[in-house]
Image (spheres, helix red, strand yellow):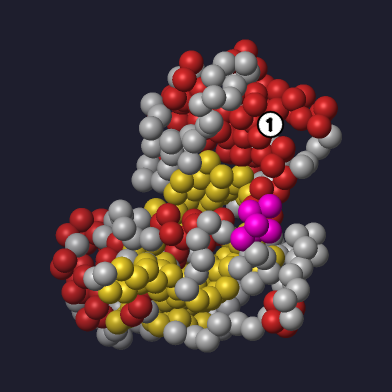
Amino acid sequence: MKPPRSNPSTARGARPTIDSARKIPPESDAMIQLHDVVKTFSNAAGEFTVLKGLDLKIKRGEFVSIVGKSGSGKSTLLNMVTGIDHPSDGQVVVNDVDIYTNFTESQRSKWRGRNLGIVFQFFQLLPMLTLLENVMLPMDYVDMYDFNKRPERAMDLLKLVGLEKFANKLPVLVSTGQQQLAAIARAMACDPPLLVADEPTGNLDTRSADTIIQLFETFVSQGKTIVLVTHDPSITSRTHRNIIISDGELIDETISRALPLLRHRHMLEFTKLVEERVYRPHETIIPRDQHVDYFFMIRKGGVEVILQGKKKDHIVSRLGENEFFGEMELLRGGKSIANVRAGGQPVEVLALPRADFIRVMNESPITAEALGKIVQKRLEEHQIADYRR
């Protein structure tokens, strides 16, 4: 365990105010930064580490989904971002503020009220308050907006989510979908730059869930950052990024995008085994008529697949980010039938050793079948190119 970070101001007993707590040099495009975050719980059975040194950056204006099996650490990760729980080690920076070094519990609660909107699966509306009063509550808590303006703002938010006709009803008198819409209006009451949601559509029918996601998309178009935990593939397909957590560790996003059919445990295994490589513009990555010892996934840039003709080379395909190559030779055996080189810009790739690739393909027949179809398609493209020469 690393020693706790010292803070001169806290050592002297002084705490910064909420408004003066921007101690971290800002990264203009970063809303959330996690640096080597660890979370360990202790009980009678011993210690259990839920988060194992996470590094994560989420940009401003991104719509991000977080997925993973039960117990993988999804909700614990959200609790780190929202300041609800403390990391055992590491740094959490949200909107340029180190939220654990800078604040007392009370100050963090006030900061959270002004900077975060939180939406839970079970709504958590106060049952004795009307929908309008529930939406006003965050404004009262952090003392935002003039007292006389708060009902007007709350009503505007209820109109935004289509609930103005139900403003004076208690939560029990509206549907579950309407309760969740009211909870979203409440989360946006103080106009926070970041909205965090934990399974916000888990208890809703398909139509209500779609309404919620459309609303989130509207907020993102207005510049808000949204991070949500979900198990629903129809939602992850609509977010900008899909972050997968497995056994307390983050899976490399290039791997999850390139090989979406892999089991999470195999994705995590690949994340630990791959080598990061960078090739110069037009540098050869796989020469023709050579044995291929690696499976490659493209993180940044692009590559060209080239067949050599009698008079000139023919580019038969170009591959870009989150695509892969080398699978043809690894799955079918034999030497490479084409040159693969970097395109006109440097290319960053992840290289997985042959033995690890073959072993996991044997354990994941669905992925092997999908790759086999890609191999067949590429062979047909090469045959067409040969014919045209």
Residue in the picture at 70% in, 23% down: 155
Give the quadrant of residue 353: bottom left
Q: Would you place residue 54 above or below residue 179 in this image? A: below
Q: Residue at x 77, y 24 (%)?
A: 152
Secondary structure beneath dot 1 equals helix
* Residue sitting nearer the eye, 168 or 215: 168
Q: Left or right: where does residue 1 sit relative to residue 189?
A: left
Residue 109 lies in the magenta-colored region: yes
Q: Is residue 246 magenta?
A: no
Percent coordinates x, y for residue 56 in the rendering: 53, 67
Tell me the magenta residue range: 105-110
Q: Main secondary structure of the magenta part?
A: helix
Q: Is residue 340 above or below residue 64?
A: below
Q: Which residue is mark 1?
A: 136
Query: In the rendered structure, which amino acid carries the disc numbered 1?
Result: Met
Whether residue 378 is visible to the viewer of this picture, yes or no, is no
Q: Does the image show residue 9?
A: yes
- Judging depth in this view, the residue of 193 and 122 nearest the camera is 122
Quarter location, residue 232: top left
